[in-house]
Every structure is written in C-alpha cells, then in structure tokens.
Amino acid sequence: MSEKVRVRFAPSPTGGLHLGGVRTVLFNYLFARQQGGDFVLRIEDTDQTRYVEGAEQYIIECLNWCGIIPDEGPDFGGEYGPYRQSERKALYRQYAEQLVADGYAYYAFDTPEDLDKKRSELPNFQYGHAHRQEMRNSISLSEEEVKQLLAGGVPHVIRIKVPQNETVSFDDMIRQEVSFETSLVDDKVLLKADGMPTYHLAVVVDDYLMKITHAFRGEEWLPSAPVHILLWKYLGWEDSMPKWAHLPLILKPDGHGKLSKRDGARLGFPVYAMNWIDPQTNELTQGFREMGFLPEAFVNLLAMLGWNDGTDQELFSMEELIEKFSIDRVNKSGAKFDFEKAQWYNAEWIKKIEGQKLKEKVLEVFGANNIQIADERKLSVVIDLVKDRCTLLTDFISQAGYFFENPRVYDFSSVSPKWTAEKASFFVAYSEILNAITDHSPTNLEVAFKSLAEEKSLKVGDVMLPFRIMLVGGKFGPAVFEIASIIGKEESILRIRKGLDMLNKEV
RNA sequence: GGCCCGUUCGUCUAGGGGUUAGGACGUUAGAUUUUCAUUCUAGAAACAGGGGUUCGAUUCCCCUACGGGCUACCA
C-alpha cells in the first residue's frame, strides 16, 4: 500500500504562535515535501471560550513568513474541508453516538460542580472504571432514567469507556514502542455539553476523514495517546491510523520546564514567531521577525533543535532541510532553548545572503526607524559593506544608518581628552583637500589623509579615530575611507565641520 | 502521589562494546583588522550513580537518582 503522505498542523487559535509550534509545523512540512505529500492546515477551535480574534490569520502569516504554505486549509481550499473544526461541529456527534451504541462510550450527566466535589473528596480521583459506577451516567443509571434525562434535555457529555486491564501500545516514529495500562487511563470526555468535540474525538475523526498518514505533535500529547489509539480501534478505523511521532519539547534555558512566552519576557528574547498583540489586553509579545531575525535563520535554528543530519553541517536552507530531513534522526530528549546560538544562526545567515537580497528587509527596518533612503543602489553597497558586523536586522540601524543621515549619537570620549589645536587645524586642512580633489576613491582619500598627517607631523593613528567618530559617531564600522568615499565629498566635509565644532567646544 | 518519556562538555549535539569521546554556540588566550565586528589559531570543558552481561562498557540490561510531560466538558 503506497498511499500518498498527508500530514497536518492543527493549532488552536488562542494566541501567538510559539516557537515549539513552528518547529512542529516545520517537521510536518519537511516530511510532507520530501515525501511528495500534502501539508494540511487545520484549525482546532473547538474550545469556544478560548477563541481569540485574529489568531488564525496571525498563524497563517507566521507560516507564510517562514516560507511554509499549506496545500490545504481554511482559505487554501482542498477536498477535505471545512478545515475549521467549529465548522465541522455537526459531524462529530454521530461518531460519538456510534461509540455509545457500540458500547465504547457512554453519556455522563455529572455537572462540573459534581466533578469538583468528587475530586476534592478523593485526592486521586479519576473518572474511570474504578469510579464510574459512583457517578451519574448511562452505566450507573437505569435505562429509564437515562432516557428521561436525555429527553428532558439535561446537559450531558459523552465519555469514552476505557477498558480495564488491557495494554495499549503503539510504535512511535521517534520513541519506538510506547505502552500504557488502560486501567490507569481515565474516561476522557469526547463530546462536550455544548455539542463540540474535545480534542480527543476531533483529532481522531478529522485525521481519519482527512486521510492523514503521519501525525507529528509535541511530547505533551504522549499521555493521551492511548485514548486516541482506543478511539481508532473502536471506530473501526485501526487500519487507517496514522503513524505517530511525538516530538521532544523545547525547554526553558535556565530553570526548568517548557519554554513559555513568560520566559521570553523574563529573559529578554522572543518566543513567538511574530509580534502578537492580545486583542483583549493589548499586551504585546515580541516576535522573532520583529526582533530582526531572518526567516531562513529562524527555520534553520528550529530544525537544529532536536534534529541533525549526522554531519557537522549546521547551516541548512529550507531546500536542504527538505532533502535531508529524516525522522530517524530526531532526538528523543527535550532541548533547552539557547538564544545566543539562535543569534549566531541569524548572523550567519546575514553574512550568507547577499546585500541585494537583504535590501527589502533592511528598508523595512529603516522605515520603522525613520531613516530615509534616497538612493537604493547605494543601500545594497552599504549592506554588503557592513553586514558582517550585524547579528540582527535591527543592527543595520546603527551599522548602516550613518551612511544616510548624520550620526544620531556621538561618542568622542576616547579622543576628546587628547584633542589639540594641531589636530583641529589638520581637519580644517583635510576638508579643504576633500573639497579640492576630484577623485574620491577610498585609496585616494587615504593617501591624501596620510600625506597631510605627515606634513603636519601628526601620527596617522592620532587623527584616524577622530575622523571615524566624526563620520559615524563612534568607534565602529568598516574602513573609514570606504565610508568617506560612499557618503561623498559634501557630506564628509559637513560632518568634519560638525565634529570639529563639538570637539573644540568640549576642550 | 500515579502514569509516561528522557539523561554525552555550561548549552545544542555526533558517536557507539576496544576512540586522544568529534563538532557548534558560549567562554579563555593569541594573530589580523590604525575603530568595532568579521576571520584565523590555540585552550579549558562531558559520557548522572550503582549493579550486572562481557576479556573489555560511555555504548547492551536492571535499579536508583535527576530532569521533563500528563493527570480539565484546554488544546
């Protein structure tokens, strides 16, 4: 049987897209592309109380930024829609009822208060074989009573009837055999009182109906896997069950536990793919994109969190990942997120991509920071000149901004103590030379600079640094004469004058 | 507490019955760069512990410890 590979990413639209979520999509996507299969986006919005406006669109935008475009999904079309579970609501009840009819599930009439009470009485209460007789459900109640309750429209849920003393096991693509004792698994709710399915029912029904062949999800789902396996069996679909892969979790860099958006805020790095503004509270959670990450780097670093190709290669493009990805090489253990290394990936990608291709993104960053660009051709040249010293795209503000406007801040502290009238007159003379000469190539500017220094009996090094700071505002940047050549004669002279003013005033 | 999963430098990891246990980030030292960064060279740094199995275990098995996840009418 060589059926077409079909995978899905099934986020619930409750807020920003976590980096762990993006990694899950990525692995799905890489696998699908490599196998020539389909990648489906399915929105799991079965919890109406947690639905957040705009979250779905946001998720799609994140995927788009990463270069991951679903083959099927809401607004993408496909033969297996609708792709929002809320729009499939009517579908689930029949399967739940079928399970009841077949004796694999039952109606339960306990109110949330009943359950709370029970749980506070019994510290380790589980709604399962040990206690279901004590609860109000179609197993403990008489047929007559159940009929009446149902007819009277009493709110109820449908729960799976998990058997006693069976072993459920399955072959995980990452962990090999995993097994569970059913006696320890509780009777999970399948259909809620509002008629919506829970995740447990929905994931099985939809994976079946959408012909999903491989299901990737986070390790946090492992404990509920037996419920899903049982459901596949009870619904009579065992032969169509997808192969499971439970991905290791991404952990906090310090302390312990799953990485959460709170950790990002606490430690000063993003956790979401893109900026997310909570529509209720207006609270902003920073994203990798806005912090200045390249999607190439983001995808690359995520892929390396739990996977490697067995060689020393660490830099992979999406194409290479698609080609080389293999589930066998996915790690079993969780990985602490290392933001330093994440930044390294970004720096590497900035170095790797040529200036011309970085232009649009740098332009965006500049725009957001009110840096006007008159000459876009000049921008590409500048980017190539400075990109080796940028870790984040936002670094271009300080590393390239001064090519297009006056430095916003000046730090003369390292030269002002040693400032002299001789040096001041050197710069007056040098700006006259700049004005006079016609060849403003870097080497020419440098030759003129050095011979003038010699003429004035000054050490080149003593005037080089002041010159640099006049031009760029601080002790950084590429070769000074490169800079002077690019910003041009007029601008160089203006900046020397301004610098002279500031230095003379300070002394 | 119960169940499930995991454990190689600080971090991400390679490896796998006999290796000088390899790489990367970070870190330290040096070189280059009349600035800063890049780049280059070198260094420090790991098989959680205890039992087996074996001529030999970091590698296979068991136990312990530790870490993580789950334990909702949330996903």
Image: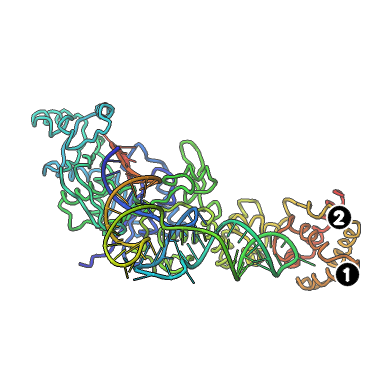
Report the amino acid beneath label 1.
Glu
Q: Is residue A65 left or right of residue A74?
A: right
Q: Is residue A432 left or right of residue A267?
A: right
- Residue at the image position 36 percent from the left and 49 percent from the top: A11
Q: Residues within 10 Å of mark 2 (few under 14, many from 20)?
A: some
Q: Quadrant of residue A356?
A: bottom right
Q: Residues within 10 Å of mark 1 (few under 14, many from 20)?
A: few
Percent position of residue A285, x then y: 50, 44
Q: Distance of mark 1 from mark 2, alpha carbons? A: 18 Å
Tag count: 2
Nearer to us in this view, A45 or A79: A45
Percent position of residue B26, x then y: 57, 56
Q: Secondary structure at mark 1?
A: helix
The label number, if any, that marks residue A419 in the structure image: 2
| Residue placed under numbered mark 1 in the picture | A454
- Residue at the image position 25 percent from the left and 42 percent from the top: A197
Q: Quadrant of residue A112?
A: top left
Q: Chain of mark 1?
A: A
Residue A32 visible (yes or no): no
